[in-house]
Amino acid sequence: MNNNYIIRMEKPADYRLVEEMTKRAFWNVYVPGCDEHYLTHVMRDSVDFIPELNLVLELEGKIIASVKYLKSRLKDEDGNMKEIVSFGPLCVEPDYQRSGYGKVLLEYSFDVAKDMGYEVITNFGDPANYVARGFKSCHKYNVCLEGDVYHSSLLVKELVPGVLDGRKWYFYESPVGELMSEEGFAEFDKTFPVMEKAWRPSQEIFYIQCRSTMGN
């Protein structure tokens, strides 16, 4: 890994570059095509968006990685609320993937989040990608969705060890998806270079993971 990089907050001048990189990074990975570049675009307008955690990694003057965070919430069985953060999309320019840049950017963002006073981070993702970064199954922290659903891809990291203290917590993600629409995506995607949709085995893995839950 080339260490001649900097990590900084995203600037408005970076928006399009980051969106284009995001499309290249996610294209055909989880479904034929992708919409993560559209999510990246609309989430900046969300009330839950955290500018201080809207970060890019720049290598020799070129942005090659990006991560964004939204506020989310945990509620215990007594109705007590805890504001936490959730990250995504995290993306790395395809030519630089598997080189350590995503790890560096993500761990830097953990330090920023902790300095801002956040105690917990969540992510819906592939455990294979994140357990080495300190994430564990939501089941181990007794964090679930409404209906006592423990989703296999809901991962949790305590920035302050022991803060979740074993009680049951219900997770509520930001409703950022309400800012997205099929019509909006279609119009937005028209402004990008055409890329060919295709099937990959990773899409079947994603299909299985996003429908998998664990028993109580």
Image (tube, helix red, strand yellow):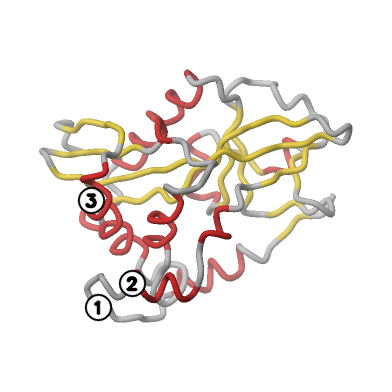
Q: Position of residue 162 (x, y in %)?
A: 69, 21
Give left or right: position of 193 versus 100.
left
Q: Amino acid at mark 1?
A: Val
Q: Earlier in the sequence, mark 1 or mark 3?
A: 3
Q: Amino acid at mark 3?
A: Tyr
Q: Residue drawn at (65%, 31%), measured in percent from left and top? A: 83
Q: CA distance from mark 2 to mark 1?
A: 9 Å
Q: Residue drawn at (54%, 41%), measured in percent from left and top? A: 48
Disc 1: which residue: 194
- Given contact means CB atoms under 8 Å apart, are the residues at marks 1 and 3 in contact? no
The secondary element bearing badge 3 is classed as helix
Local packing at callout 2 (Cα closer than 10 Å; few below 14, some 14-19, many 20+) is some
Q: Earlier in the sequence, mark 3 or mark 2?
A: 3
77, 214: nearer the viewer: 77
Q: Residue drawn at (29%, 81%), measured in percent from left and top? A: 196
Disc 3: which residue: 96
Disc 2: which residue: 189
Give left or right: position of 130 versus 9.
right
Q: Amino acid at mark 2?
A: Asp
Q: CA distance from mark 3 to mark 2?
A: 24 Å
